[in-house]
Amino acid sequence: MHPLEEAAKSIVPEAEVFPVNPPSISGLGSTGGISMYLQDVTGHTDEELLSVVQKVTAAMEERKELADVESEFSISAPYVDFDVSEDKAKEMGVDLTDVYHAMQVNFGGEEINNFTRFDQVYKVVLQGDASYRSGADALGLIFLRNEAGTMVPLSTLVRAEESSGPTSITRYNGVRSIYFKAVPEDGYSVSEAMDAMEKAVAGSVTEGFQAAWAGESRQGKEAQKAVLFLLGLSLLCVFLCMVALYESVRLPFVVLLSVPVGIGGALLSEMAARQAGSIYMQIGILLVIALAAKNAILIVEFAKERMERGASPLHAVMTAAKLRLRPILMTSIAFVAGCLPLALASGVGAAARNNMGIAVTGGMTIATVLGIFIVPVLFVLMAKRS
């Protein structure tokens, strides 16, 4: 148990304490974690919804990527339904407006005024005392005056029936929805936890339900979709720039085809270190892509100049690889050494630094070791076809 929970329990033993994380982006979500709505698009009864919620909650709790799964749906809240007899009210000379107003004031409360004190504005709310509104029998304690001036008990005009139902009815995007909240388990990213929630919903519900994200989770899902588009657009821009630089359509592929080596090295390093994929890992992969492309450009640029002087593709690229080996190794070793503190960090916030540092050091090491062999081979293949 968390120390704060123990302290709260020691002061108020009957209290239920739920520690929550604050949202990382202010204004998106009331608490930290993953926010999901299960939308009922076909209209089910409360009992059917409760059965679905129990199945989905059980499926989410079985997922190793999720922790602290919670749902706010319940149908055991006490309800009181009031049925006003309009015909009897007319017979006894009681205005229906007085009936509804008396119920509103005594049971619900009505704001009648404001007053200012100590530079603060306070509301004045008129409401029946707790002992006179705690049950359906309180109707017999409320009286209304009819047209003849006689006091009529409200219980003769209103019939109360006790029942139960949901604590609240939530709608999201105009559809009745059930709110679920969860946090990623240690060692798993938010993206992996969200995928686990989607799989739990897909394996537990029938037709007529769909999952919708809210708050930070919705923003993250939309950003995740945009990453691939932006990455592809950046590669296209780089390709067009190199086509203009080299005046060739094939030679830029030498640089682009060497990039997956660095990406694969970064992903393998993350898997070997059992790191969760996150935005920090994506930033590290972008750095690896830039440096791997830079190393390939050093070799391709020098080899192209040699070819223009009359050297064969093989001789040109071999000479370029030998002459550019030292600057490539110096740059790569300096970069990897500079990122080692991130990969080996400990303490507060170490998870984010480890995630980025491992991706950069592992990806750059593999891209450097394999790139000096792969780039010449790709250059010879592309140059011969050109």
Image (cartoon, rainbow, N blue to C red):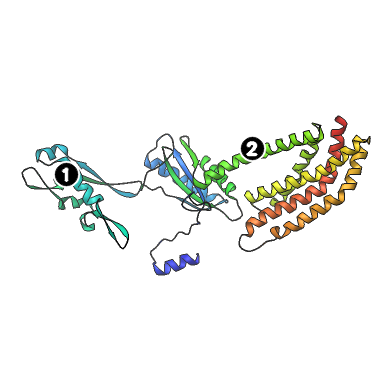
Instruction: Describe residue 339's horizontal placement relative to residue 10 as left or right.
Output: right
Tally the marks: 2
Most distant residue in the top direction:
386
Q: Which mark is residue 229?
A: 2
Question: Which image quarter: residue 88?
Answer: top left
Q: Is residue 367 visible?
A: yes
Q: Which mark is residue 42?
A: none
Q: Tag 2 or tag 1, which sits nearer the N-term?
A: 1
Q: Residue at x 74, y 48 (%)?
A: 265
Instruction: Describe residue 261's horizontal placement relative to residue 187 as left or right.
Output: right
- Secondary structure of the residue carrying numbered label 1: helix
Q: Is residue 273 visible?
A: no
Label 1 close to label 2 by CB (< 8 Å): no
Position in image of residue 108 (x %, y %): 25, 50
Measured Cα–Cα span from mark 1 to mark 2? 63 Å
Most distant residue in the left direction:
148
- Secondary structure of the residue carrying numbered label 2: helix
Pointer 1: what residue?
A: 98
Identity, as a three-letter code, of the amino acid under mark 1: Asp
Q: Residue at x 57, y 54 (%)?
A: 185
Instruction: Name the image quarter holding the C terminus.
Output: top right
Q: Closer to the camera, 54 or 340? A: 340
Identity, as a three-letter code, of the amino acid under mark 2: Phe
